[in-house]
Amino acid sequence: MSELMLSDEILMQVEKPARYIGKEINSIVKRPEDVDIRMAMCFPDVYEIGMSHLGLQILYDMFNGYEDVWCERVYSPWPDLDKIMREKEIPLFGLESQEPVKYLDFLGITLQYEMCYTNILQVLDLAQIPLSAKDRSESDPIVIGGGPCSYNPEPIADFFDFFYIGEGETRYREILDIYKENKRAGGSRREFLQKICCLQGIYVPQFYDVSYYEDGRIASMRPNIPEAPEHITKNIVTDFDGVPYPVKPVVPFIKCTQDRVVLEIQRGCIRGCRFCQAGQLYRPVREKNVDRLKQYAVEMLKNTGHEEISLSSLSSSDYSGLKELVDFLIRDCNEKKVNISLPSLRIDSFALDVMSKVQDVKKSSLTFAPEAGSQRLRNVINKGLTEEDILRGAKLAFEGGWTRVKLYFMLGLPTETKEDVQGIGDLANKIAAEFFETVPKEKRREPVQIVASTSFFIPKPFTPFQWAPMCSAEEFLDKAHETKKGIMSQLNQKRIKYNWHEADVSVLEGVFARGDRKIAQVIRKAYEKGCMFDAWSEYYKNDLWLEAFAECGVSIDFYNTRKREKDEIFPWDILDCGVSREHLWKEWEKAQEEIVSPNCKKACNGCGAAKYGCGVCVEERV
């Protein structure tokens, strides 16, 4: 078990061989003869990205907490090793045992980002597991998908035996027990899937048939066996303090994207931004007890040796115990020379006071996410942030010594006009002007810099904008050029830098986000042509993707640029994320009327998440 799958000769040929050798601090090794179930959890991207993902660490810790289970980790081999493994026919292996994944009982793949879809096929291919679920034998692992992209699993449904919908801490023990019993009874792979398909949150694609109208829209999605339910409801943690948390996370040998201790302070968001899928999927908001977080912080810093601690949340400022927790961390962590990272904070006097204590002002920048250039469009998307809020935050920041501000916007939002696009430059200019009005000339130790970045809006399932048309690549680029022109016309243009996202990648992501089962053939075709690591600009091959769509006879415009009608059946309608379709449609109508909805702590909007009986839904309103 201690022998490495890769020889020293191979390790010397690849970049960062520490990605593939395992044996990191806090990694867990068990004896195969001591467990009943062996599995691997895979992040289909390079090691440094996957090791930074909290969700995978949570599941790894939970599974290995079971005496009868050994869970290993798998990541996508970087292209240099991928080439060698294919040439030498080396099967993909688990980091802990260094043994082939194809001999395990389960392979779980987390689906965090649509642009990793070809990497799913890379992982299966290198593991020598048939790409299509229908082609797998009794000896192949059961392939599971989970994570935010599983809320529309249809584009990749062909490649998975089942999808786990929702939060992983709730249902897996039951699934594993059914697997063990089925195995003892000599049951088949199909019999196991039949036994679990009736469990909450379990979607087995092969047990559902899809029919289509002539124009390509879905006519129906229906179960084809009596055990499969009409709808699959997500799993959710109702006792957020009672679930496992990895206080001894695996510590990588090499620097990762997020090389720090991560404290998940709450799950969900009260804000209800209409473009944000995570804000809908993780409802209702649930907070972690502040005393428990203090305990975790102390233990995790001791168990890892990390020199930074980060608070994880979609909106950290909304956590009720934030001040108490931050005061504790400043007091405890500063003594140990540990940095504190506070992402997702609203910029106000409290946040700036905290950051001035935990960051080196000379090296840091502040981030605002107005998302839209005008107040009208911010009302459309329900951002809940006014221009006055932004300028007041900037003024406080400049008074506190900050000179660099990052601004994040989206282009192509529903109802967007030319005036909204031009508003991006106007707002950036106003922030620069705020610096000159706030900071006397003699106190300007360095020039102010405003960095405005735009991404392109992609409609996502289970959001009010799931009905919205998406721009084409050409329209996106026109908007980016209009934004740049607007910035160049500003008085303070020399103090403003502008960056924008790739349009081609956004278009492809849009297809994957709202695609149906027809997209699987395109993904497979593109993979066979050599597409892989599509999230990395140096490996993205748009021409090959366009060839794959053409050869499969699949239209990009059908999935992206047309407007959906109210009653159209979506590929993801078979799933229930806890937020009702009626609520989402109501928010879509309010968006077009530029009406703002209150956040969950101020008033209940009747989204449907109250049925879970936990979190903000059962708390008193403020």
Image (cartoon, helix red, strand yellow):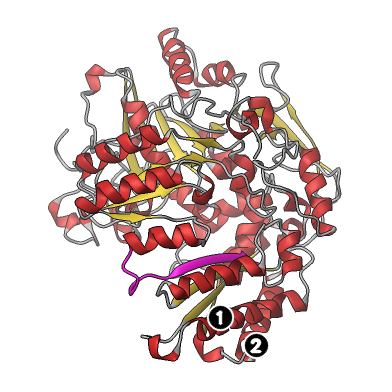
Q: Is residue 584 visible?
A: yes
Name the quadrant of the N terminus.
top left
Expressed as whole percent of the image width and height from the top left, the position of residue 197 reads: 60, 22
**Residue stretch rendered in magenta on the structure:** 358-371
In this view, which residue lies farthest toward the top?
185
Estimate the x, y position of residue 107 in percent, counting from the top left.
41, 34
Q: In this view, does 389 lie to the left or right of 567?
A: left
Which residue, given by chain and number where applicable, does mark 1 sit on? 434
Q: How many marks?
A: 2
Q: Where is residue 244 in the image (x, y as percent from the top left)?
A: 38, 28
Who's the residue at 31% across and 43% down the image? 91
Res 458 quadrant in image: bottom right
Res. 490 image quadrant: bottom right
| Pointer 2 local density, CA inside 10 Å: few below 14, some 14–19, many at least 20 | few
Residue 126 shows up from this direction: no
| Rendered position, 65 above or below 5 | above
Label 2, label 1: how many angstroms apart (C-alpha)? 22 Å
Q: Position of residue 550 (x, y in %)?
A: 67, 63
- Residue in the foreground of this view, choosing between 246 and 599: 599
Q: Is residue 239 magenta?
A: no
Nearest the eye: 621 or 613:
621
At horizontal 45% and vertical 87% (from top left) the residue drawn is 440
The reply to whether the magenta stretch includes residue 368 is yes
Q: Earlier in the sequence, mark 2 or mark 1?
A: 1
Disc 2 marks which residue?
A: 485
Write the residue at 57% across / 28% down: 235
Q: Which amino acid does label 2 sit on?
A: Lys
The image quadrant of residue 27 is: top left
